[in-house]
Image: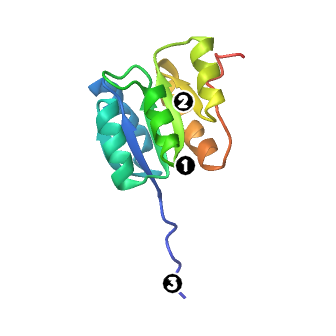
Amino acid sequence: MVAREKRKATAVLIDDHAGALKAACEIMKDEFEILATGMNGETALEIISISNPDIVVLDIGLPGVNGFETVRQLRAHGCATKIVFLSIMEDLDYVQAARAMGSSYVVKRRMRTDLLPAARDAMDGHTFLSPILSV
């Protein structure tokens, strides 16, 4: 009997900083099938609506439509994709806004240690907050 390989969950990564985007791709590529990347909210909305990924890693401080507004628009259109916010901001107001949206929150300086656990938790229906953030 041939064992069937488990399908990787699909992901879209959006960040306006090329270095952070590249790092996130490297961190996630072994466990997630990266469908697409983008660098602004408008592109994110288009990519996500077309590809319907299991999870989106999304910067908050995007040019144009920011990450929070991107998620609001996605939810308004019935998109249930899991969201992990990735941000340089270590601000409790941002964290609380992310939590209110049912999303995880990873600070960029902890991306290497926190991004995969956050993505795994999101896929399991849980939220993750970088440990340095206490709410």
Quadrant of the image for the C terminus? top right
Tell me the kind of residue under disc 1. Answer: Ala
Question: In the rendered view, does 67 fall on the left or right side of 78?
Answer: left
Q: Earlier in the sequence, mark 3 or mark 2?
A: 3
Q: Which mark is residue 113?
A: 2
- Pointer 2 with pointer 1, Cβ within 8 A: no
Given residues 39 and 41, the one toward you in this image is 41
Image coordinates for residue 56, horizontal then vertical, percent: 46, 41
Q: Tell me the element at label 3.
A: loop
Q: Quadrant of residue 100?
A: top right
Say which residue label 3 marks: 2
Q: Is residue 27 visible?
A: yes
Mark 2, Cα crowd under 10 Å, few <14 / some 14-19 / many 20+, is few
Secondary structure state at the residue bearing disc 2: helix
Instruction: Count up the numbered dots.
Output: 3
Mark 3 crowdedness (10 Å alpha carbons): few <14, some 14-19, many ≥20 = few
Q: Label 3 is placed on what type of residue?
A: Val
How far apart are labels 3 and 1 at the CA level? 33 Å
129 on left or right of 69: right
Which residue is farthest front?
Answer: 76
Find residue 71 and report its horizontal and vertical position in percent: 48, 35
Circle 3 or circle 1, nearest the eye? 1
Q: CA distance from mark 3 to mark 2?
A: 35 Å
Q: Which numbered disc, 3 or 1, marks the residue that appears first in the sequence?
A: 3
Of the numbered discs 2 and 1, the one sitting upstream in the chain is 1
- Residue denoted by label 1: 80
